[in-house]
Image (cartoon, rainbow, N blue to C red):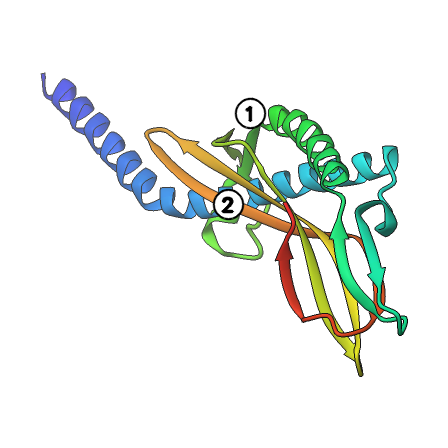
Amino acid sequence: MQNKIIAVIAVILIIAVIVVVNNSLKPVIMEMAKLYGSRAISEAVNTTVESTLSKDSFSYSDIVSLSYSGDGFVSAVEYDSAMINRLKIALDATLLNELEKLRSAKVKIPIGSLFGDLNLSGRGPAVKVRISQASVPEIEVISSFESVGINTVKNEIIVRITVNSELYLPPKKESFSYTQDFVIAQTIIVGSIPSGYVDIS
């Protein structure tokens, strides 16, 4: 009888230790999972942009038309909305396929990396955390104007991709966002063009 009581107490103590350790490590695991998750999404976004632009080359003149005044300076900047939509659709389709691969993927975090010790980093068994896409990625096409000299500006066409995701570590769920900009075309313009950003989506 006494042995049974000792065994029950031992089991209770083991469960209590597991619960305490689990609860104390979960915040650290979630932070590490965000880091690993961001890396995975970054790779998906970079793959998307690289593969899309390698199939369809988008030059500055494909997206932007410049109008000139009588003295030869730029008087207006016009954007080809059809070409911009084509670019966004191509990126969106490819990115959704890449993110779909992450839906069933799991982030593996070595236990040693959770303790902040360089000697233990990357060592030990891995904790698996599932990443799930939370929403459709947002793709913006932005025109950026930057002064680079007297009456001279640099105009860049920037693609800004934002992906909202969720991490699941039952029963906890936490969301995070990843954003990255890509310059896909640029030119130097001589003329009075205001500096700043213009959303041309």
Q: Nearer the viewer, residue 128 or 193?
A: 193
Instruction: Indicate left or right for 87 with 33 as reference.
Output: right
Query: What quarter of the picture does the C terminus occupy?
Result: top right
Question: Can you identify the residue that label 2 sits on?
Answer: 177
Looking at the rendering, in which quadrant would you find the N terminus?
top left
Element under disc 1: helix
Using the image, tell me which numbered label, if any, was put on residue 103. 1
Q: Is residue 171 left or right of residue 83?
A: left
Is 38 or 109 nearer to us in this picture?
A: 38
For the residues labelled 1 and 2, the Cα–Cα distance comes to 15 Å
- For mark 2, does the 10 Å Cα neighbourhood hold few (<14), some (14 to 19), or many (20 or more) residues? some
Label annotation for residue 138: none
Tell me what residue is drawn at x 84 percent, y 43 percent.
Answer: 58
**Residue reaching furthest to the bottom:** 150
The residue under the point 43% across, 40% down is 175
- Amino acid residing under circle 2: Ser
Q: Mark 1 or 2 closer to N-term?
A: 1
User: Percent from the top left, x then y, of residue 121?
Assistant: 57, 50
- Residue in the foreground of this view, choosing between 168 and 193: 193
| Picture coordinates of residue 90, whole percent (x, y) | 73, 31
Q: Is residue 164 left or right of residue 171?
A: right
Quarter where residue 119 is shown: bottom right
Q: Is residue 118 above or below residue 34?
A: below
